[in-house]
Every structure is written in structure tokens, then in C-alpha cells.
Image: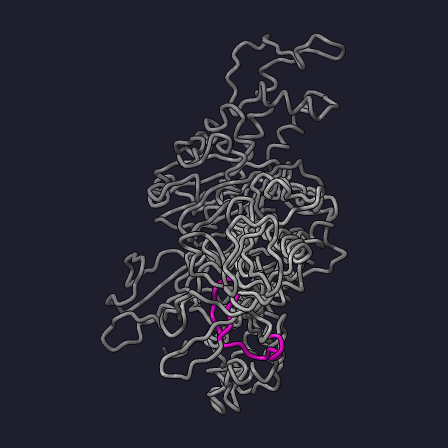
Amino acid sequence: MLSRTKFIGAVEIGTAKITVLVGQVTRGRSLSIIGLGECPSRGVVKGIVVDYKAASECVHAALEEAERVAGARVGEVFLAQSGAHLEGFQNESEVRVSSADNMVSALDIDNVCQLAKSKQLPEGRMVVHHLRRPFRLDGRLVPDPEHLDGRRLEVGYWTVHGQESRIADHIHVIRGFNVRVTELILSSLASGSVMTTADDRRHGALVLDLGAGTTDFVLYRDGCALLTGVVPVGGLHFTNDLSLGLRLNDHDQAERLKLRHGRGVVTAKDRAEKVWLNGDLGIGDRQFPRVTIEQITAARARELFEVVRKKLGANFDAGHIAAGVILTGGASKLAGIEEAAAQVFDVPARLGEPPGWVGDHLRAPGHSTALGLLHHGLGAPAENPARRQPATVSGLLRKIFTAGN
Amino acid sequence: MNPPAISLPPARSWRDLPQPIKPRAMSREGRRRRVLAAAKTALLAATLLVTGWGGAEFLVTLKTNPGRLVAPAGGTPVRGLELRTDGVLDEGWARGTLALPAQAGLMTLDLAALQRRLLASGQVERAELTRQLPGSLVVTLHERAPVARVMGQLGEAVPQTLLVARDGTVFAGAGYAPEMVARLPFLDGVRLQLAGSRLAPIAGMAAVADLLAAARAATPALAHGFSVVSLARLATDDVLVVQSADVGEVVFGAAGGFARQLARLDFTLAETRRQFPVEPLRVNLAVDSRQVLVARLLAGTPAPGRAVLPRPAAGSVATPVLFFPAPPASANFSHAL
């Protein structure tokens, strides 16, 4: 965009609902959230589009609603990406400083970064993010090694890649509204950017975004994202477990029971204590033992966190997670879930709190991903690129001719 | 900066995915936005093209013929002059007054200066000049109509007959038929004064114009005999004194009601001549509603019975006698007699 004010959209295509936020970015420095559109999701399973038409209808309805509320047309979209097809691997490289006086040059930095990123992927896979970790110059951590003195420059990248067809499906759903996708950002990174402070990331933190169909996580250390991942388990699994365990045919009843009486850990002492299914004493209303409900949800919560811990593997070191575990996402509304996380990860756990500039109507944990997308739209680079490409004439022309799209 | 020493093929990124999709895969809103975006892009491209073409033309012209940039249409000479007027002036007068250079460019003309030249004649009350591409100059004039004439002298020039319009403007007059000018009465009792390079307007000409217009309309025979209109007593007595061929001198009240005064004059003259064989010398129509006719008895004529002054001695034919002609019962102004 050539003007000083632009309208960007943040779209999260979730399993349970589509969330769209419209932000007004002024002079690239200030962000105002001026529109919110939500729509129950259809055609999306575990964060993956399985029915293009149904998913498109929902996403476009949410986009239209957000634009209507904002009173502005979105020019570009920041799109959240989730799904179990996303994987990552660690890739490190090192170069010897080329200068005779051992001063690190920009060329050395470019070389070591390119070397670290140049890994071929299997057929049908494509890179979503290259997350750079801090540089090491002769073994010491440095945020920017240029002009520093040293002999050996090392850098590591966490490369996130995904299935090409599934990424393309996500993008095409947005393109069906004739809006350009400017950035594709992992849901976990988006949530993590608003639910953590710079201090949290420097001290080490694990952010878990508990969605309806998936749980996205990102582990921060030394101020950078160390690794990310997606577990295809979310809040809907809690509901399904209750449906099966309590023999409930109505999914909505199980969902209400989960929200009212479910807990991340078992606290009920009296096995005889019972709770009503609907509480209206109508036909079909019946009682269930509270402890049974808590046991079902607590077991699923514990299992979920254990799967995450297992995926983190050796990268998770409780001694380097000073900021603890931060929970967000719609499923984090389950009571006591932070206690379950604290027990499994053996570090303090808490529910994430969005920054103070976020309005009350957007402070629900289910909006954290969309908020994070807008945060990226303001200019926070998703991958901490070592160097930005200089502006070119062709790039300027492309901007001019795509301004209307 | 030197090129990177390591050149490895980068892994495929999501940015390599082609974002455009077929219109049928879009929603209705998406298709609508696509059409709008295409229209905007086309408009932007057209604007850029036109701007680019204009810039290129500018550069080429700057290089080959910079003079055209100063006055792009100035190279087109004035091919024709079209005169539209409500008066008598003709195209020759316009050409002579405008004095356009032979190769004057249409766009280089100073229309304001040309307009001033036209207005300087005095005969032109309003002038409008319009460029009509590709090479015509349209001159639209609204002329003053002459009411009377006056002898005047501008600077060292020979005294000449000048025309006076209703608004008092004094001008030389061009294009009028000599017979028409000869029918205009002369002005008397006025003092011409210079105002800059022109003569100052004469005050009171509106009354003169009204009088003459009324006379031509109501009593054309009388009007034809008006030879001099004097403004000498206009400021002091509010009267116009007309020298006429039918009456020696007629005094009109300048406040208006000329048609009525003319009717009274016409009636008085007719009645007097019918009743008495006299030569009218003077009629004053400005005093109250009465008119007093001063006439001279023709030689050998018996004295009128209603004369109020002593009969003049024999042989003294120049002694005026006041007459009071009896009006008919139906006359409107019988009360004045």
C-alpha cells in the first residue's frame, strides 16, 4: 500500500470457529483494532480444510462481517496456519569468518544463514517458517554479530514445513475473497507473540494454544522461538470423551457439561456428589457424579500435556523455562487446566493474559491467535530475518499494481 | 557487496504458491472485489500511460521546439475575426481598432488589452472577446445609441461633431449614416471637460433622451424640428430648452411627463394657429400645468380679442403678444388654460 494508513485482516480458520480481526495500521507504527467477525466453522477438521465450499462460506461470512463492523475494506490478510501436517526440524551451520582481521561482515552472516536454511524438503512439503535462533560467535551468544571480532560463526534455524496441498487450500480460501495473503504465520507463534513479554521469551516460556481441534505450542528460549509443534488434540476431544464416557448422544450437552463441571485436575472428594445434566429438571435431565466428569476431563488434559512434553523431548528443560507454561486458546477456559499443566511439565503454569492495549471484548483466550496475527501485521517479523531485502523498482511496481487487490 | 560465497537452492516456501485462483472458485463477494480491483488497476495503468505519454511528448517538444511549450497554441495564427454587434460598427472598424499583428497567435492575444481598446472608443458600451478554436476570435459588442450631438475639441485636434449617448458618454461615432447624424439635435449649454484622455460624461442626458424619444413617438413632426437642446437651465431650473423649427423655443420641465408636455404643446400650437394668424416664438411648458405661448402677430392681422397685453404700436411687429387659446371642452388640460 502506498498510503500511510492500511487496513489489514487477521484470519484464523479454526476447527470450531472462524475469527477475523480488522486492524488499522497508521504509518506502520500504531495499530487500532476496528473490526471483529466470527462465524461457526464448517468444513474444517483439526485445523485442515476438508470442504472447500463450506469453509469458504464461513470464512467469507466472517470477513464480510468484520469489514462491515470496521467500515473498511481489507487490503491484505495475515493468515494463521495450524494442523498436524506441520512439522519442524532443527538445522545448524557454521562458517569461518572470512575477513583477515576476524571482523564479521554482512557477507559472513548471509552465508551462514543461507547455509543453515538450505535443506531440501521431501516432495510435496514446503517451508512455512525459518525461525532463527541467536548467533554464536566462538561459542558465545550474540544477537547481531556484524562487526564483532571472532573466528567461527554459528547459527541455528528451526524450520517449519507443511503439506503443500493443505497450505494451498488455506490460502485459496482467502483468495476466494480476492484478498492477498501477505503472511502465513503459525498459530502458536501468533498466540505466543501477544501472550508473552520479551522478558518471558528471554527467560524461557512454553506457550500452549489449546484450540478445538489442535493444540499448538511454541517453546521460547533466549528471546527466540526454539521450536514449535502441533498436536491434533483439542477441546473437542474433551467433549467427545465426555460423550462416550457418560453415554451422551447430544454433543452440545457434553460441551455444556464440560464447561460447567469439567476440570483439568480432579478436586471432587465426595464420590456421591452429583450434578445435573441440564439443571432444568425437564425430560431427559439426569444426574452424573461430579468426580466422574472431572476424571474424564483431567485424564484427557494430562494425556494432552504429556503428548506435548513428549514432542518437546530433550528441548524441554524445566530449568530453562523460568517464565513457565502459558496457556491460551478456547479450550484453556477449562477450570484447573493450568494445574494439570503445572503437574505434567513440573514448572509454574498460568493462563495467558493479553497486553493491556487489548479491549475487554477481545481478551477472551479464543482471540489470542488473531490478536497475534495483527501484532505481526504491525511489523513484528515472524522469522527475525537477518537482513531485509532492499526495495527494488520491480517490487515497487508490484505493490502499485496489487494495491487494488 | 560481493555475492554470497555459498549458493544453494532454497527450499520451496509457501510464498512460491501461486495465489491467484479461478473466478469460479471465488465467492460472489470475491468476484465483485476482483472486478473492482481490475477496474482500479486498469484506471491506474491508464493514468500511468497517459502520464508517461505526456511526459514523453513534453520531453520531445522540449528538445525539438521549446517555443511551443511557452505558448502551445500560440503557433496558430488568428485566421478569422467574427463580429457580433447590436449596432452599426462593422468588421473593418473592429480590425482597425484591435490592430492585431499580422501573425498574432490566437493563444498569445491579450484579450483584456484588446477589450480596453474597443471600450476606449466610447461607442462600445460592453465588449466580449472569445477564442474559438482552431483560429477564430469572436468579438461581441453592445453599442451605445447616440441621442444628440455636440461640437467638441480633443486636444489640438480640429473641432468636430461628437455624439452623446443616453448615459452622457461623448464619442466620435463611427459607421452611422450622415442623414441619421444630421437628424440629431445639437446640445447647448454644456461644458465639455476632459477626464483623462477622454471627455467626461455629460450629466442630464437621460432626460434629454427621454424627451427626444417621447417626441419621436408622440409628435414626430415636432420632433423633426428640434434642432438644439439646451441644458443650461437644467441644474438651476430643472428645465430643458429646445430650439425648434415650429416654435422658436420650447421650455420643457425635466422632471418627466414629457408625453403630456408634448401633447400640450401640440394642442397649443394647433389651437393658436387655428384661432390666430401668429408665428409662435416661445412656449413654456414647465411652469405649473399652464403653458404660455409667446407669438408674433403676422403683419396685417387684426388684434386678437383675448390678448392681455396692450396692442403693440403700428410697425412694431416684433413685440410679442401673449395668447390664451381656448381649449375645447374635451381637452384634458382645460384646467390649465
A83 w.r.t. B274: above or below = above
Asked if the stretch drawn in magenta spans residue B188, the answer is no
| Residue plotted at (36% across, 48% down) | A223
Relative depth, front residue between A360 and A79: A360
Q: Residue furthest front?
A: B314
| Residue plotted at (70% across, 45% down) | B328
Q: Quadrant of the C terminus of chain B?
A: top right
Relative depth, front residue between A24 and B116: B116
Q: Quadrant of the N terminus of chain B?
A: bottom left
Colour setting: one colour
Q: Determine the image quadrant of residue A322.
A: top left
| Location of residue A245 in the rendering, given as x and y in whole percent from the top left corner | 68, 23
| Location of residue B155 in the rendering, given as x and y in whole percent from the top left corner | 36, 80
| Location of residue A5 in the rendering, given as x and y in whole percent from the top left corner | 47, 52
| Residue plotted at (51% across, 85% down) | B100
- Left or right: B116 in relation to A140: right
- Left or right: B21 in relation to B106: right
Q: How many marks?
A: 0
B261 w.r.t. A150: above or below = above
| Residue plotted at (41% across, 59% down) | A156
Asked if the stretch drawn in magenta spans residue B172, the answer is yes
Relative depth, front residue between A394 and A267: A394
| Location of residue A14 in the rendering, given as x and y in whole percent from the top left corner | 62, 41
B12 w.r.t. B234: above or below = below
Q: Determine the image quadrant of residue B277.
A: bottom right
Q: Which residues are magenta?
A: B162-180
Does residue A331 appear anywhere in the picture?
Answer: yes
Does residue B252 appear anywhere in the picture?
Answer: no
